[in-house]
Amino acid sequence: MTRSPLLDVDELSVAFTRRRRRDVQAVDRISFSLREGRITGLVGESGCGKSVTSLALMGLLPARGVRVGGTARFRLGGGDEVDLLALPAARLRDLRGSEIAMVFQDPLSSLNPVVPIGRQVAEVLTRHRGLKGAAARGQAAELLARVGIPDPGRRLREYPHELSGGMRQRALIAMAVACRPRLLIADEPTTALDVTIQAQILELLAGLVAEEGTALLMITHDLGVVAGLCDEINVLYSGRTVEGAARHELFAAPTHPYTAGLLGSIPRLDAPRDEPLTPIRGTVDDAIGWDDGCAFAPRCDRFAEDCLGGPPPMRERRAGHRFRCLHPTEPAPGEESEGR
């Protein structure tokens, strides 16, 4: 018998409402699932709805001016299921840190600048595990050592500004895994880090998933970052999923022009030195509303008239490989796609 997903997100929508102005649809009916011991990626340019999705799941969106729809069924440790989007705020606070945790994008702004690192890590242990005093400090030091921070006893007394960017990110990860959460969300955890530290952080996250059986939702704009990390990848554009597949399938045969464009814009070490990069033309602001057609149409090299008039349906290239395009770069079996 196949066990149900740890988290099953169905038709999640987030709209920011403004008085006497048009609503901003940040997330538009996206669906995906997470399983224990697996890493799922949400990939796309800035503004596609990745971070808003994570904040909706964590219950961290503003209380006013936001309309959230859909469901996010989460399986608790005892086996019961709850809808994260419908839970009371107090119940969600109990889950945050204990069963669900998040590594935020910017550690310097996420950590309290006037509180020592040790106290911030110990606070999670006190809130969810009841540890206090020396017991909490000792456990906090063990967590810092576990995520690769040298001399953890001294680091407990230091403030965020005294740590390097990589060490601050490790401290955030230590706080997130303090209570061994079953679901971990990492929102662009390697932003502004050099490539060596990026590799160390990604290796650390992968190791935590392997050791604890945690489900990891990896949010990034860089397909190169998730190339060796994720088991499944969902590509978002203008609030909707435009392609989803297993990692090897997606990289071997990108089907949506947007996915192909993201891959094509990554520098390759085996390419000739004089070979130019091929960026996607335009910007995310060039998108049209999904109700008017494919949002990517203004930037797409395969645009045709039938791309307008309504949103393209989600189709399946083969089992587990979904895409939302009328003129894909790789035709589905048994059909031909006219190149443009």
Image (cartoon, rainbow, N blue to C red):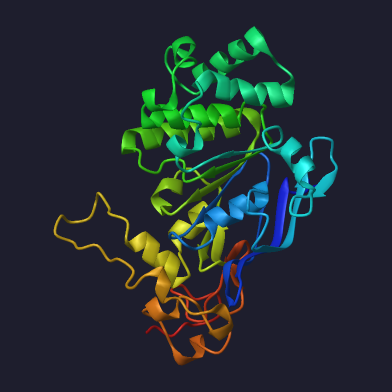
**Left or right, 28 with reference to 205:** right
Residue beneath the point at 63% across and 7% down = 134
Q: Is residue 243 visible?
A: yes
Residue beneath the point at 79% across and 40% down = 76
> In front: 84, or 3?
84
> In front: 328, or 252?
328
> In front: 32, or 252?
32
Q: Residue furthest top?
A: 134
Q: Check the image and report above or below for 213 versus 143.
A: below
On the image, the x and y values in percent for residue 161 come to 39, 27
Total numbered circles:
0
On the image, the x and y values in percent for residue 45 come to 43, 60
Q: Residue furthest front?
A: 19
Figure quadrant of residue 11: bottom right
> In front: 58, or 3?
58
On the image, the x and y values in percent for residue 295 come to 49, 77
Residue beneath the point at 66% across and 59% down = 64
**Left or right, 187 with reference to 258:** right
Q: Is residue 146 visible?
A: no
**The C terminus, quarter of image:** bottom left
Residue beneath the point at 55% across and 85% down = 292
On the image, the x and y values in percent for residue 49 come to 54, 61
